[in-house]
Amino acid sequence: MSANERPQGHQTKQQSRTYDSAFLRACRREPVPHTPVWFMRQAGRSLPEYLKVREGIPMLESCMRPELVTEITLQPVRRHKVDAAIYFSDIVVPLKAIGLDLDIKPGVGPVVADPIRTRADLARLRDLTPEDVHYVTEAIGMLTAELGETPLIGFAGAPFTLASYLVEGGPSRSHERTKAMMYGDPQLWADLLDRLAEITSAFLKVQIEAGASAVQLFDSWVGALAPADYRRSVMPASVKVFDAVAEYGVPRIHFGVGTGELLGLMGEAGADVVGVDWRVPLDEAARRVGPGKALQGNLDPAVLFASTEVVEAKADEVLAAAKGLEGHVFNLGHGVMPSMDPDALTRLVEHVHTRTAV
């Protein structure tokens, strides 16, 4: 089902309430009262109130406490007046939920105790059930009760990015082990991504059925691949994820970093909205993606460290490049940095709303 068709039957109460929000209208490429804004990694990061409630609580544990997840998700909505909330979690949560021994090390990222390197290792990737992530259902129930007409965006890590952590054992600049498996044992690689696609699909379904009004698939590291490798070795798994949640009729967003050469393929994978980092202007991104898709982006996050005048001028450049788009959701070209001034983000939201008000 296209996100432009109003879903029938299993639409949740919250999805009905948020259907005509500026964010969801932009995702569906419909007229909007103003360009909607949200920020990746907006849930906390730079907010003092986030640091206060997270103090002494490890990242993965914080993702499993519904009351804490609810508070952290709501904080930037209250402060910045963004047009959508992004569910507070981490892309490795479903992997932890199925029993993999991993942790998020401060200053490092996800670290896997026993990496996936052989066919026998695939047996550790069992199916994800709703009971495995019951805290997600509970938290989204609490959130949607608070959010009213503001949409909640659910999210998951894409199969390639999850695989890169599992194969490397942690973050990697060159992804050498990942690529070695992809090139050297293509069948094992395909089977690994297929299993991860099933887990990711199940995780997104839990979020949608609990009340998320849109979902974003983060393929953070897929920009490390050439287009031919993406099409052959990655795209089938991403297609599987998008197809698995198509029946819900909620907008599906696809985002990766350094993916300028992959934008067209990422749109082909099944997204309704293609996220664009700051390296490609939105008008050029639209040419690469082709018609029938909304775009999301794409102010360089580093601009937020400049003066207000510079931030507004750069934001205006993004809005000018987005002028002819079928649909546009304003966002940063990547995530909010921890050292950003929260007030700069608040001012940016107000500026975009004011500049684009109909």
Image (cartoon, grey):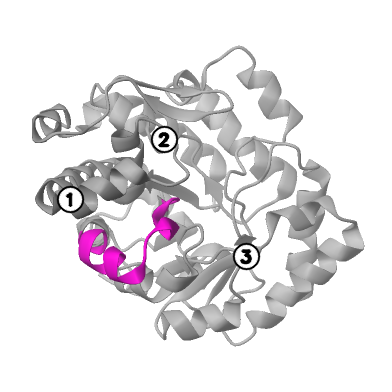
What span is colored magenta in the figure?
A: 219-236
State how far apart marks 3 and 2 are (Cα).
Answer: 34 Å
Of callouts 3 and 1, the N-terminal one: 1
| Residue 307 left/right relative to 190 | right
Residue located 22% across and 43% down the image: 196
Of callouts 2 and 1, the N-terminal one: 2
State how far apart marks 3 and 1 are (Cα).
Answer: 33 Å
**Circle number at residue 141:** 2
Question: Mark 3 = which residue?
Answer: 278
- Say what secondary structure mark 1 lies in: helix
Is residue 21 in sight in this rendering?
no
Of callouts 3 and 2, the N-terminal one: 2
Question: Mark 1 = which residue?
Answer: 184
Where residue 172 appears, as percent x and y from the top left, is 44, 40
Residue located 47% across and 41% down the image: 144
Where residue 256 appears, as percent x and y from the top left, is 46, 58
* Residue occupying the far top of the picture: 56
Which mark lies nearer to you, 3 or 2?
3
- Say what secondary structure mark 2 lies in: helix
